[in-house]
């Protein structure tokens, strides 16, 4: 009878586990299908600080510098794309958006795997389920562990090995003198617990990183079990790196602080008394030090496949997208381009092999347009996806000079900050690699005469370099003075029933409207003020001098 009861209990447990596993898989599949193609939620500053930590731990080196990133609000662009299921994916995507020199080989691999995932949604969902089970851990400190592992190892690891044996060594004494043996064993246990607690506080960031790395290792192992040739080709080196770290995976996953049951709580005390986490910690750090390239390959491989799935989701969430084509000539061409952050944005087209000036009044759309082009030049090279119907460009650096600010601490005026910002665009160009320079209101920090003169001289200089400049400006003199070396485009508006109406469509040629003065009357100024302004402007346009 008793064996039958035991058999029934075991069978019931096994059935319960199987049913729960089935429901868990169903929930993951529903989540993968439901989240794919959806617009992601906005990220908090807390989340972004955590996500960018991996990029910064690696030195923060990229082709897209901090000024450009801030000027075109790439944090929000990142958040618009980010549908990643893992922290590794978010951190890899953030890092990748800073890099535009990825090479033709990466593009071919990315395009092939993207096409395969789109044609085989079942395999994409299988990958997503693994990614969701791997999960996220914000402020996981993995970057510090990967890039600075040599500073993480504990000194004199042999001391902990000896201390580990002391509680056990005291127990035989209890057969000779039980009170003394038990007291010494208890003292050794308390001492080890105190040492473990102190060391644990000192290496808590590293322990957190190791625990998340254990989850990443699990995820990489499951990806390899899919036996997908497309995934294997997309993640070269993953299998070899996984084999090297698989032996320490158990030690890494065993360092969890989970206390979901009473048994878990007891096991934590055992680990403290025998310094098990510290011993395991040194073993893991040693393995990382011996195989730093491999541990980075593992982390970034999981991040890379998560990023690819996120970009596929981003594509599906768009009204239209284009896979960019890269050519060897200097120039850029696009059709139906729009800004990824704007709902219902008006699309525009352009084809130019030289720099261009974009004129127009305030709020007409010229600044938003050049920002949209800059963002898409980055997206084209970083994730091979553009918010356009067609996009062609030569590969190159992307740099901006837009939201310039004076520097009170260093005693720099606004104008000096502007000059430095433009100068770095010139310095970024080289004979081997084109630079795309985007400038909003060039040299606005000085008087009109010097601004026009200096702007013309600077833009002529930039035009002789391997730079394609796109400049948004109010200065109507620039198109006339730079007509031979820069193309001219403009945005315009019209007045209807004392209301300003913008169509946000890019048009050929320089701006010819003077609606800014008419706005004085619309906003309530007397007619005499408007008439005087129109007279002054008309005299200047006719005679090139102020009356």
Image (tube, rainbow, N blue to C red):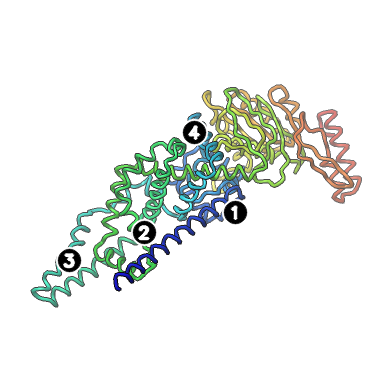
The residue that disc 4 covers is: 109
Is disc 4 in contact with disc 3, using a CB cutoff of under 8 Å?
no
Residue 255 x %, y %: 33, 58
Is disc 1 in contact with disc 3, using a CB cutoff of under 8 Å?
no
Residue at the far front: name it: 1
- Could you tell me how far apart the alpha carbons at marks 2 and 3 are, in whole angstroms? 27 Å
Instruction: Pick the residue in front: 299 or 369.
Output: 299
Residue at the far left: name it: 176
Instruction: Pick the residue in front: 420 or 274.
Output: 274
Between disc 4 and disc 1, the foreground one is 4
**What is the quadrant of residue 440 in the picture?**
top right
The residue that disc 3 covers is: 168
Residue 272 appearing in the image:
yes
Earlier in the chain: of badge 4 and badge 3, it is 4
Per the rendering, the mark at residue 41 is: 1
Between disc 1 and disc 2, the foreground one is 1
Residue 387 x %, y %: 64, 39
Number of marks drawn:
4
**What is the quadrant of residue 2 in the picture?**
bottom left
- Could you tell me how far apart the alpha carbons at marks 4 and 1 are, in whole angstroms? 29 Å
Residue at the far right: name it: 527
Earlier in the chain: of badge 4 and badge 2, it is 4
Residue 72 x %, y %: 61, 42
Give the structural element (helix, strand or loop) at label 2: helix
Earlier in the chain: of badge 4 and badge 1, it is 1
The residue that disc 2 covers is: 204
**What is the quadrant of residue 509 in the picture?**
top right
- Could you tell me how far apart the alpha carbons at marks 1 and 3 are, in whole angstroms? 54 Å
Residue occupying image coordinates x 55% and y 30%: 396
On the picture, is 253 further left or further right than 420? left
- How dense is the environment of label 4, judged by Cα within 10 Å: few (below 14), some, or many (20 and up)? some
């Amino acid at each position: 009878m008793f064996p039958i009861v035991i058999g029934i209990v075991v069978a019931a447990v096994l059935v319960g586990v199987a049913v729960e596993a089935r429901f868990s898989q169903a929930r993951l599949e529903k989540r993968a299908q439901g989240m794919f193609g959806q617009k992601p939620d906005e990220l908090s500053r807390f989340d972004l600080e955590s996500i960018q930590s991996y990029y910064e731990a690696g030195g923060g080196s990229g082709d897209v510098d901090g000024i450009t990133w801030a000027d075109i609000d790439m944090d929000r662009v990142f958040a618009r794309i980010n549908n990643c299921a893992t922290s590794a994916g978010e951190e890899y995507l953030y890092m990748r958006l800073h890099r535009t020199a990825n090479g033709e080989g990466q593009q071919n691999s990315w395009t092939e795997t993207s096409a395969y995932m789109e044609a085989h949604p079942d395999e994409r969902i299988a990958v997503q389920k693994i990614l969701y089970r791997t999960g996220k851990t914000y402020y996981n400190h993995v970057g510090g562990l990967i890039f600075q592992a040599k500073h993480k190892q504990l000194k004199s690891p042999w001391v902990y090995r000896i201390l580990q044996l002391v509680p056990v060594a005291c127990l035989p004494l209890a057969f000779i003198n039980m009170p003394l043996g038990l007291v010494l064993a208890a003292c050794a246990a308390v001492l080890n617990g105190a040492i473990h607690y102190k060391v644990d506080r000192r290496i808590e960031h590293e322990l957190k990183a190791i625990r998340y790395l254990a989850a990443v290792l699990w995820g990489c192992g499951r990806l390899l079990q899919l036996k997908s040739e497309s995934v294997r080709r997309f993640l070269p080196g993953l299998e070899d790196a996984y084999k090297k770290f698989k032996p320490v995976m158990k030690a890494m996953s065993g360092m969890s602080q989970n206390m979901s049951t009473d048994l878990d709580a007891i096991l934590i005390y055992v680990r403290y008394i025998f310094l098990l986490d510290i011993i395991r910690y040194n073993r893991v750090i040693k393995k990382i030090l011996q195989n730093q390239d491999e541990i980075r390959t593992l982390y970034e491989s999981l991040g890379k496949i998560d990023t690819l799935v996120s970009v596929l989701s981003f594509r599906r969430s768009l009204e239209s997208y284009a896979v960019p084509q890269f050519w060897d000539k200097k120039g850029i061409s696009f059709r139906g381009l729009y800004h990824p952050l704007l709902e219902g944005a008006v699309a525009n087209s352009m084809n130019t092999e030289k720099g261009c000036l974009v004129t127009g009044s305030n709020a007409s759309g010229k600044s938003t347009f050049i920002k949209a082009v800059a963002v898409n030049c980055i997206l084209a090279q970083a994730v091979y996806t553009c918010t356009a119907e067609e996009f062609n460009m030569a590969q190159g650096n992307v740099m901006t000079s837009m939201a310039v600010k004076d520097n009170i601490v260093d005693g720099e005026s606004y104008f000096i900050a502007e000059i430095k910002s433009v100068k770095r665009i010139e310095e970024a160009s080289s004979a081997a690699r084109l630079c795309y320079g985007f400038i909003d209101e060039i040299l606005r920090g000085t008087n009109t005469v010097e601004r026009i003169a200096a702007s013309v001289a600077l833009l002529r200089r930039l035009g002789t370099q391997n730079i394609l400049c796109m400049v948004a400006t109010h200065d109507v003199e620039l198109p006339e003075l730079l007509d031979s070396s820069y193309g001219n485009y403009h945005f315009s508006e019209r007045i209807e029933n004392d209301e300003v109406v913008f169509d946000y469509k890019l048009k050929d040629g320089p701006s010819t409207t003077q609606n800014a003065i008419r706005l004085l009357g619309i906003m309530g100024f007397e007619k005499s003020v408007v008439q005087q302004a129109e007279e002054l402007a008309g005299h200047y346009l006719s005679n090139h001098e102020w009356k």
